[in-house]
Image (cartoon, rainbow, N blue to C red):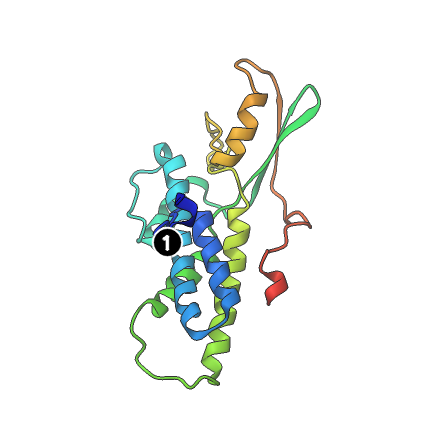
Amino acid sequence: MTESVHPYAYSVTPAAYLERARTLIIEDNARSLFYAALELRCFVEARQDLYLEAQKEYVRSVPRAWKIGAQGKALDGVFRSERIQHISWYVDGELILDTYHIPVSAALRNNAEKLGELLHAQEVHRQFDHNWWSETRQKIIQTYELAWTCNKGSLLSPMFLHDGRTVGKMMLNVETSEKFQPLMKEGTAGIMKVDYPENLPIDWTSDLAAFQ
């Protein structure tokens, strides 16, 4: 039996947490809401941990993953902005890399912290038709959408920091790095373009949209 189908296979990457949250949201029952909340909170912890690992030389300390607020403050100290950073890399006029750094926004972080309320024993019983269920489901979906967008960024560290310094090494996620590295040889000259788009690409539509 391969790891991918083994009943105890449980990946702890941000993408894996997000995928499991999606599956649980689509199930659409009381039990799945609580477990979707857990997976989404873990996504934020894992995503921030991934960013901090990539940016560790620029932060004074790296808080534990479960300290969402403390991790957020450490990351904010690096970039000091929630602006999305878009990097385009050209070699001989050809675009060989198109990547985004998408910070974990305060809205996503706050939502994840509030989802912590679902990770404990509930103090009251709610009937199946109580408004709380639909309202909670909408909050979880909103959190998923923010998480999905954040996860689309393949650049783990901004190339330009708040004080104007540039990052010496481009920190990409594993998938993008594997595609990009064969195209770059040591000493290859290229042109890097940086912009801060107000809007994301129009084809970035959450894979959950069809199930809402």
Could you tell me residue 45's position as x and y percent? 37, 51
Task: Name the side, left or right, on which 150 lies relative to 65.
Answer: right
In terms of image quadrants, where is residue 212? bottom right
Residue at the farthest top position: 187
The x, y position of residue 44, in whole percent, is: 41, 53
The image quadrant of residue 37 is bottom left
Q: Is residue 106 visible?
A: no
Q: Is residue 128 above or below residue 84?
A: below
Q: Report the front residue among 55 and 97.
A: 97
Q: Which secondary structure lies at badge 1?
A: loop
Query: x%, y% of residue 133?
Result: 46, 77
From the viewer's perspective, is 137 left or right of 41?
right
- Residue located at (40% from left, 35% from top): 54
Q: Quadrant of the N terminus?
A: top left
Q: Residues within 10 Å of mark 1 (few under 14, many from 20)?
A: few
Q: Residue at x 41, y 40 (%)?
A: 78
Reading the image, the residue beneath label 1 is: 7
- Identify the residue shown where x is 32% and y is 77%: 122
Q: Amino acid at mark 1?
A: Pro
119 lies above or below 42: below
Front-most of 195 and 210?
A: 210
Residue furthest right as drawn: 93
- Expressed as whole percent of the image width and height from the top left, the position of residue 3 reads 39, 44
Q: Does 188 sit above or below residue 49?
A: above
- Identified at 51% across, 49% down, the residue is 150
Q: Is residue 152 above or below residue 188?
A: below
